[in-house]
Image: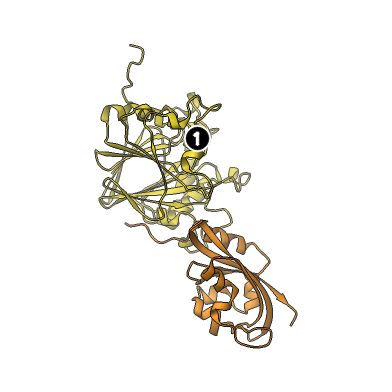
Amino acid sequence: MAASEGKSLLLILAREMASNLATPMFVVDPVGTLVFYNEAAENLLGQRFAVTGPVRREQWGGEMFHPEDLDGNAISLDDLPLVEVIRKRRPAHAEFRITGLDGVKRSIAATSFPLFARPDELAGALAVFWEVPL
Amino acid sequence: MRARVWGCRGSLASPGRRTVRYGGNTSCVEVRVDDDHRLVLDAGSGIRSLGYTLEAEAPRAIHVLLTHLHLDHLQGLAFFLPFWRDDAELHIWGPASPTRSLADRIASYLSPPLFPVHLSEVPSRPVFHDIPDGPWAIGGATVTGASVSHQGPTAGFRIEAGGCSLAYIPDHEPARGTDMRRVEPEWISGHSIAAGADVLFHDAQYTDAEYRNHVGWGHSSVGHAVAFASASRVRQLILFHHDPSHTDADLEVMRNEALAGWEGQGAPRLASDDMVVDIEAGAVAFSTAEEPELPLLLA
């Protein structure tokens, strides 16, 4: 039987860390698919990961959370820090608003950084979130 | 495919009356898929005896696949006869580092003052390779290496040939921060290496009770080895990397722990320094190796 597709060790360790963090955290794979978010992020996003499962980049960066800037303008997918990390392979930070799956609008600060297994091998990226006063 | 265990002890070689049955040499497993190439998984102290056998058989190329560079997986390399032959074709594969080449890192050990000869002066002039990202071919075998959870950069290997597969993950702590019974198998470290393998050599250094005092040390308990093998749906689990403090009798108690928790096909076995495993399509057979005839060095 041929070897099956498992997750890279960096993603596995990132998920382990996120699972044990009280700070909201996203884990995405190299193409930006949201492959895990932790319990603290579930509270912020208004839905459990067990319910959503993995979410494509276009989905979580758009219709799912409706990101908008602090003036209420929609943010394009490419301008979201976690997408920027994947595109440019460097850390990014931004403050913006999302509408959770529970319908609640929240203002958040997000810091994202890439995970490199080797200098030329992007294994994925992490984003840490904080809710900031509206 | 035939695998021969030359060393299955972890951490430190442990000769003596209490380790005769399962052996005291550190990690080394020889894998044969054709006559021209020989795959050697790790270069623990067991590789010394293998060197005598390969002198007689003279395969065209020898590939030593290092899971990592901890001494129990490397310490035998300088006592491996082909290492000192200028006509040997010797390839050494190991995990990549972002800062130092594989040869540089191995030379930290194989150079004065820790060893009298510098690696650059070794007659065989081994060719060093970082483990590639994807599968690669060695003779008739397809080899895959992937990072696994241990201390420092560490790989597990999967070897496939003729429809048979062998997975080797001697140092591995997949349970660190993960409940293997609850996550999807693809989220378990090492899964891509072990999934569906005919044979899995896996770390089982500790009893479940001992593990509680060794969380984060990079190794598995017997229970974790069983859980990992079950999640990976392997045909045959071989318990490997025995703790140097465990006697033959201790190991048999551990095997019974494994049997109690096992629900799959072939019952888990303890690796021993003379174990031979033949893998053919759909079947795994075990036998005991004859001791190699060593040359009369002083005759």
- Residue B297 position, x and y percent, is 35, 16
**B103 in relation to A119, above or below:** above
**B252 in relation to B134, above or below:** above
Q: Colour of chain B?
A: yellow
A40, B39: nearer the viewer = B39
- Residue B285 position, x and y percent, is 30, 42
Question: What colour scheme was applied to this rendering of the protein?
Answer: by chain
Q: Which residue is disc 1 drawn over? A: B107
Which residue, as the protein is rendered here, is positioned at the far bottom? A72
| Quarter that holds the N terminus of chain A | bottom left
Quarter residue A41 falls in: bottom right
Amino acid type, residue under disc 1 in the picture: Ala
Question: Which chain does tag 1 point to?
Answer: B
Residue at 46% in and 33% down: B26
A51, B41: nearer the viewer = B41
Quarter residue B292 falls in: top left
B220, B128: nearer the viewer = B128
Residue at 42% in and 31% down: B46
**B291 in relation to A118, above or below:** above
**Residue A105 shown left or right of residue A50 in the figure:** right
Q: Colour of chain A?
A: orange
| Quarter that holds the C terminus of chain A | bottom right
**A61 in relation to B88, above or below:** below
- Residue B139 position, x and y percent, is 27, 45
